[in-house]
Amino acid sequence: MDEVYDAKQETPTERKGKQKKTKSWDYNKEIRRLQIELAHLQAWVKKSGARIVIIFEGRDAAGKGGMIKRITEKVSPRVFRVVALPAPTDREKSQIYMQRYIAYLPAAGEIVIFDRSWYNRAGVDRVMGFASEKKAQRFLELAPRFEAAIVESGVVLLKYFLTVSEEEQERRFKRRIDDPVRQRKLSPMDVESYQRWWDYTRAYDEMLRMTDSNHAPWWIVPSDDKERGRINCISHILQSIPYQRVKFEAPDLGKRQKRPSGYIEDQSVRNVVPETTR
């Protein structure tokens, strides 16, 4: 890969200018290379029994879905499990807040990707009034301790927050409005997040400050340039997990059985999908 930059070493102005430059690398080629490495990671996780949690949080329209799709599209859903929980049921609302998330933590040989996570309490729940300020503050105090227990149990925990500028978020929202295949991605909550940009900014600033820890630090992913963000983030995931390549034992296919001498092809009428291509 020709260029992967460290966001912590650049100012916002430098970063924005860099993102506008013509890419000096082939995105499709890099994604292919990284997806091959993710397949090697998968083999190691299965063999070693490792347990990994990857959390994706961030602004609406920052590209979390696209990031997760690129990570998972070439690997097994039995190893890479994506968890995107809906709004809690009445029963779940009566439970300890973290309770429903604990059930989705990985067993041996699994990587769990949270498309939003327990941090809903510090973001949308807090801003939209679904949780009281007292509950939000209590969550912020308890989250590092909860994550410390996860890490101490032997789980690798990685947390990523995808950022996007006001201008780019607005452009993406308008694109969703105009494109029928993207309209499903624009929910009433997205509209609220657009209107309450600064409420969310204050909430996220405090969340990142109070829940960044040595055992579970936050990693910021600038995502105005989605492709660059994906390359950088997936590269960082692979660099953060001490996996080793597992030698693939190619199976011997042997010989296919011969057609039976008495076999007669079935002559019953079958429905065949009509040919539409030319």
Image: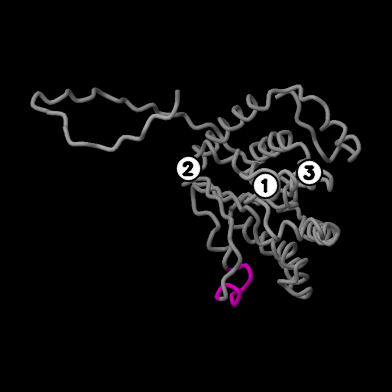
Residue at (21%, 36%) from the top-left corner? 269
Residue 216's place in the image compared with 262, above or below, is: below
Instruction: Calculate the distance from the C-alpha at mark 2 to the C-alpha at mark 1.
Output: 25 Å
Rendered location of residue 89, percent (x, y): 56, 71
Mark 2–mark 3 CB contact (< 8 Å): no
Q: Quadrant of residue 96?
A: bottom right
Q: Amino acid at mark 3?
A: Arg
Q: Which residue is mark 1?
A: 64
Residue 50 in magenta? no
Neighbour class for label 3 at 10 Å: few (<14), some, many (≥20)? few
Residue at (72%, 43%) from the top-left corner? 175
The answer to whether residue 178 is left or right of residue 13 is: left
Q: Which residue is mark 3?
A: 171
Which stretch appears magenta?
Answer: 91-99
In front: mark 3 or mark 1? 3
Name the foreground residue: 87 vs 134. Answer: 87
The answer to whether residue 275 is left or right of residue 73 is: left
In front: mark 2 or mark 1? 1
